[in-house]
Image (cartoon, rainbow, N blue to C red):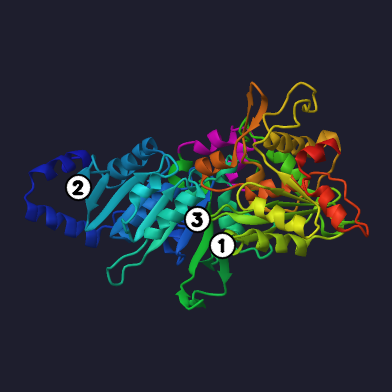
Amino acid sequence: MPGIEAIADLLDYCTEDELKEIDGILATDTPIWVPQSGPQTEAYNSEADILFYGGSAGGGKTDLILGLSLTKHTSSMIYRRQATQLIGIESRLLDEIVRTRRGWNGQKDILSINNCKIEFGSCNNLGDEIKHQGRPHDFIGFDEITHFLESQFRFLIGWLRTTKTGQRCRVVCAGNPPTNAEGAWVKEYWGPWLDPNHPNPAEPGELRWYTTIDGKDVECPNGDPINHNGRMLKPLSRTFIPSRVTDNVFVMSTGYEAMLQALPEPLRSQMLHGDFTAGTEDDVTQVMPSAWVDAAMARWTEEGKKGEMSSIGIDVARGGRDNTVIATRYGQWYAPLKRYPGKDTPDGPIVAGLAISEQKDSAPIHIDVIGVGGSVVDHLVCNDIQVVAINGAAREGLENQKDISGLLKFRNWRAFLYWKFREALDPKNGKNISLPPDTKLKAALCTAKWTLSALGIQIESKEDIIARLGRSPDDADAVIYCSMDTLKIVRTYLGLAAQKQHEQFNVNDWLRG
């Protein structure tokens, strides 16, 4: 009896009519792929528009994406972050599942088989997603979703559509828990399932509906269209279904589980158990250690707010999807952040009004003066509000400032403020900072990297972070500005004289106390 390989070789000698007949037999009588019973079948049959099927390594995640492309959809796109990572997926599809390379175009990474087309693509760098613009598909799969930037993911799923009557459209993401801060966005996107502090948790496989309003995800009660400013918006459903290596009978027979058991923590918990709460591995140049941020958030309670408001920090949106973020502090206790879409805070008077509405106990306001921030400062000064203007790129006044070791200087004010907050977070310093549990804030704080230049410690600029990740560290900047301890200016009957006295107050005055 000839083997599969020998039979596949005979296909080269078949006529077109014979090949069509074979395709018909395979399509109607013999399923080319079927899901394994358990979570893989549940994910295969899920009604979610956007499904995250993930958890431990070896749980059959990649096969689910390939199987759905082969059996349920006519036009599919499968992404990996790096182009070289596609080789293994393509080999799995061609050599182990369909067992033929007939219909495969290696130059374009496209397989045409059984009246369906499966394409493969990558987005190595931020901006590479643009090359996929305008290419609609009824199925989009992401293998290892935590490797992608959130901005890439959101852009690519915008091309999920079909003109074929009755054809379902859906997105399926496969992946393990993120191993670094850059993939932490998935914990917020699928927050009800992955965030243990989420106020409204969801069960695995449970559907939740969301739409995007003014650049922000808004949860809806169901999938019925909603009217927003005269536009009808259709919510899309999401869910998360966990996978485990023990669910995959093919992998379990290979001893793969024993290999996962041997991994060091926290990688073992992430890859073996699919634990999304296990610590991520920090980059060696990460400014804020994740464990320190976690500890600060773990000690936060509502009852921790005591005494007068000490400080306000504001990071003003610079356009796009940025937010204007306001942080307030009572001693070492930070209140939940207030976030406002950039389009709602286009000028100085509006942001100044928000700042004044948040201010209590004459707390000094610390604000970045770049862009719209300068106008905000002007309006606050005109309203006799104590404000500290921060230009992170400036260096004046830092000549004699060093880190806690007394050895390292600072490249600019951004480096000085970030590093001083890092030192305050260090558990050994006993500051006991309390930060509100907030996945977005943690991601922002753990994003910036540092280097040592000839002028001292240098922190990655906001522009460089946006270029690297596609998102702005607005939350982190607001909290770090808020961490500044500025002596309050006590108002007297002189009023205008007091205003003139602090009109030019900036970070240099703050440093001098």
Identity of the residue drawn at 51% across and 63% down: 238
Going from N to C along the chain, the mark reached first, 3 or 1, is 3
Give the total number of marks visible in the rendering.
3
Pick whichever, 316 or 16, lies toward us.
316
Residue count near mark 2 (Cα–Cα under 10 Å), binned few <14, some 14–19, many ≥20: few
- In the figure, 71 relative to 55: above or below? below
Verify whether residue 25 appears in magenta.
Answer: no
Pick whichever, 284 or 170, lies toward us.
284
Pick whichever, 70 or 297, lies toward us.
297
Going from N to C along the chain, the mark reached first, 2 or 3, is 3
Residue 336 shows in the view:
no
x then y, percent, for residue 229:
51, 76
Q: Residue 335 vs residue 488: left or right?
A: left
Q: Amino acid at mark 3?
A: Phe
**Disc 3 target residue:** 52
Q: Regarding mark 1 in the picture, which secondary structure is present there?
A: helix
